Amino acid sequence: MKRTGPASSASPFDSPSFLDCLKSLGYWEPASFSGSVSGPAGPVPHATTVLAVRYKGGVVMAGDRQASEGYQVSSRAISKVIPVDRYSCVAIAGAAGPAIDMARLFRVEIEHYEKLEGVMLTTDGKANKLAQMVREALPMAMQGLVVVPLFAGYDAGRGAGRIYKYDPAGGRYEEDAYHANGSGGLFARNALKMLWKEGMTRAQAIEAALRALYEAADEDLGTGGPDFVREIYPSVFTMDREGTSELPPAEVARYYRDLVDSLKRKD
Amino acid sequence: MAALPFYVSPEQLMQDKAEYAKKGISRGRSVVVLVVQEGILLAADNPSASLYKISEVYDRVAFAGVGKYSEFENLRKAGIRHADLKGFMYSREDVTGRSLANAYSQLLGSAFSQEMKPLEVEIVLADLGTDGRPDEIYRISYDGSIFDEPLLTAVGGRAEQLGALLRERIKAPLPLPEGLRIVRGAFQEISEAPLPVDQMEVGLLDRKAVGRTFRRFSRQDLSGILEIPV
């Protein structure tokens, strides 16, 4: 039954979840699995490489800016790292449309809870909520539209950054050092394996993240590197005691100019 | 159900309801909403540190309620649902204080005329202006009447005295510390009792912030702003 007004007969024990509110109003049709695995009607844009790296007292999250459709570039400047609230971000890989939708809904979900209850969800609480949303998207994943987010946040209780990865079935796994997702994820993880050290500083973690993205773009066709012509650079967010902040593109550009200079053959 | 045994004139009925609601509201403490240079300030005399009277509703919209806690808390939640729903289905910029204030006005109005017991609440919606759009403060009464207050408004017990006192002292947006000091002074004068910092609940829709502009001040923040040691 559709409710009419915003305040109509809300029960005091109504769920603080925004998704439940959408469902109760009839605005949300959960995807259902038809039984046949057909795949999407045509190629759809895919978001490629995103990663997160923990450092002492925080976590950095970064992603390239390219969306690919098979062997073609479908967008050069999409944002895959999406700030959720003061202390956390979600990064998306997989089918871009549903992934961006999921991130948008997740953001409202977390904010809605915070406003209704007057307190922020714990980092674990947010991570679990995202797992439920990934699980709900399972029928879509069966049709080939796989969405795999990466979640990172600063846990004020522990005074540390935390990283969670997901599988398409809604499995949630915490990573204690770093993780990378998407088509270039394997290459980024390999780079991070070499670069990551216990107790890194924020600056070191940012550097490692940017280097790993560069390596991923170098090896993977779907991942975009720094684009000096159009001045499009990977987006980088850090989360720590001070909250979530985005690294200015000019700083990212400076890092990549120095890196490219150092990689040029000198002889 | 049998027919009502007595005839009560509609005038009498409405008057009784209004008196009942007013009585309930005047028993409580007050909230002041005030435009300051830094944004819109919401300040409440509230001894509880967890049962809030002021709250964030959306990016640039805040809520304040006085009267019966359970009733304005319900209204607050309904407003947040309405705002989040609208912002999700359309865009974040489409959520305005005006449309929320209208919804509240209708809700309170129909509750007043149709329910046995009117809601014993008075609420304020503050909408922080942007890009040339001015700040808006709406006061919505227990019977659904809605008032557009340009600079400041006071609701709750002895709101009229409090409002008059503040209007006398504040003619234009002041800097935040000065505004807060005057509001605190007025609270103390009206109640004829000291108002310790930890009994104040204060929030601000911050003009400098981007995205979600509401912030709630901690006790430490307040003692810093008012220059009173904790």
Image (cartoon, coloured by chain):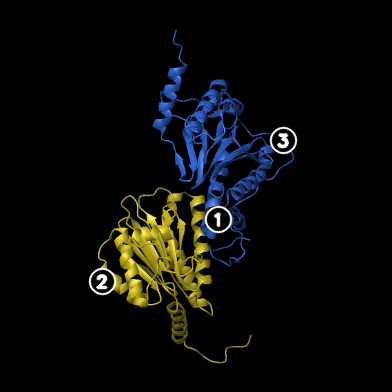
Chain colours: A blue, B yellow
Q: Amino acid at mark 3?
A: Val
Total marks placed: 3
Q: Is residue B145 visible?
A: yes
Q: Quadrant of the N terminus of chain A?
A: bottom right
Q: Quadrant of residue A247?
A: top left
Name the residue that disc number 2 marks: B168
| Comparing labels 1 and 3, the label whose residue is closer to the camera | 1
- The residue at 51%/26% (across/down) is A211
- The residue at 64%/36% (across/down) is A146
Q: Is residue A45 visible?
A: no
- Relative side of A11 to A229, left or right: right
Graded by Cα atoms within 10 Å as few (under 14), some (14 to 19) or many (20 or more), the crowding at tag 2 reads: few
Disc 1 and disc 3: Cα gap in Å?
36 Å
- Nearer-the-camera pick, A94 or A30: A94
Name the residue that disc number 3 marks: A37
- Relative side of A61 to B143, left or right: right
Disc 3 and disc 2: Cα gap in Å?
72 Å
- Nearer-the-camera pick, A81 or A180: A180
Q: Are marks 1 and 3 on the same chain?
A: yes
Q: Are marks 3 and 2 on the same chain?
A: no
Name the residue that disc number 1 marks: A113
The residue lying furthest to the top in this view is A267
Give residue B183's position: percent from left, percent from top: 33, 67
| Comparing labels 3 and 2, the label whose residue is closer to the camera | 2
Say if B165 sits above or below A200 in the image: below
